[in-house]
């Protein structure tokens, strides 16, 4: 198992995380409580931006989430003080954000590419007058934004080495600049 910066413990057959708070207290948190903290932070951010209370939310989750995971997210919303009106898969949320729910689509087929920081998911949907059906989904958990960034950095490190005979991998400033650019 990958080394984690926190301890995972079993409580009644479910994983929980030991977290040391800023005051030094150690707390045991369920995944729902951790997700609730994220949702509560997003709720506060939305309230600050909108200048009013937010009480309801539609939450997007990865397309491969099963019913138990979706229920856990709904429970997290309750803990965060949100009425989770609906849980939708991320590709459907992307299609709605693109406006496909407002287009008379009559069975239009759509492919959603979700290139994340660490993964790439591709989902085929059918959009039909505001309703969506997922036809198929697949992805690669190790192919994503950071992976692409690292490959580009490696390409230019090799190019600089070939053209200028200089290895910049030991130059933290040059590597930082290359990653930033």
Image (cartoon, helix red, strand yellow):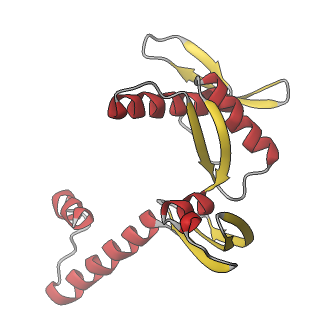
User: Residue drawn at (48%, 66%), measured in percent from left and top?
Assistant: 98
Question: Can see residue 145?
Answer: yes
Quadrant housing the C terminus? bottom left
Which quarter of the figure has residue 89?
bottom right
Q: Nearer the viewer, residue 78 or 143?
A: 78
Residue at the extreme right of the image, as rendered: 13
Left or right position of 109 against 95:
right
Where residue 5 appears, as percent x and y from the top left, is: 53, 35
Q: Is residue 83 above or below residue 60?
A: above
Q: Nearer the viewer, residue 171 or 93?
A: 93
Q: Is residue 49 above or below residue 111?
A: above
Tell me how many marks there are: 0
Where residue 97 appears, as percent x and y from the top left, is: 49, 60
Which quarter of the figure has residue 31?
top right
Question: Can see residue 7?
Answer: no
Left or right position of 164 against 78:
left
Left or right position of 53 against 48:
right
Where residue 146 appears, as percent x and y from the top left, is: 43, 63
Q: Is residue 125 above or below residue 50?
A: below
Q: Nearer the viewer, residue 145 or 48?
A: 48
Residue at the extreme bottom of the image, as rendered: 163
Where residue 128 appears, as percent x and y from the top left, is: 69, 71
Which quarter of the figure has residue 127?
bottom right
User: Residue drawn at (65%, 35%), measured in percent from left and top?
Assistant: 84
């Amino acid at each position: 198992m990958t080394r984690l910066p926190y301890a995972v413990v079993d409580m009644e057959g479910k994983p929980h995380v030991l977290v040391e708070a800023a005051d030094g207290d150690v707390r045991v948190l369920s995944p729902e409580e951790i997700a609730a903290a994220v949702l509560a932070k997003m709720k506060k951010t939305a309230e600050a931006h909108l200048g009013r209370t937010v009480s309801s939310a539609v939450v997007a989750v990865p397309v491969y989430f099963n019913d138990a995971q979706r229920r856990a997210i709904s429970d997290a919303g309750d803990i965060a003080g949100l009425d989770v009106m609906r849980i939708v898969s991320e590709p459907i949320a992307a299609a709605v954000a693109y406006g496909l729910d407002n287009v008379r689509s009559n069975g239009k087929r759509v492919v959603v590419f979700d290139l994340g920081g660490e993964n790439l998911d591709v989902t085929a949907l059918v959009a039909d007058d505001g309703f969506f059906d997922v036809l198929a989904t697949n992805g690669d958990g190790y192919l994503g934004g950071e992976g692409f960034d690292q490959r580009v950095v490696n390409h230019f490190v090799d190019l600089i080495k070939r053209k200028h005979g200089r290895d910049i991998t030991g130059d933290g400033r040059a590597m930082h600049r290359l990653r930033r650019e």
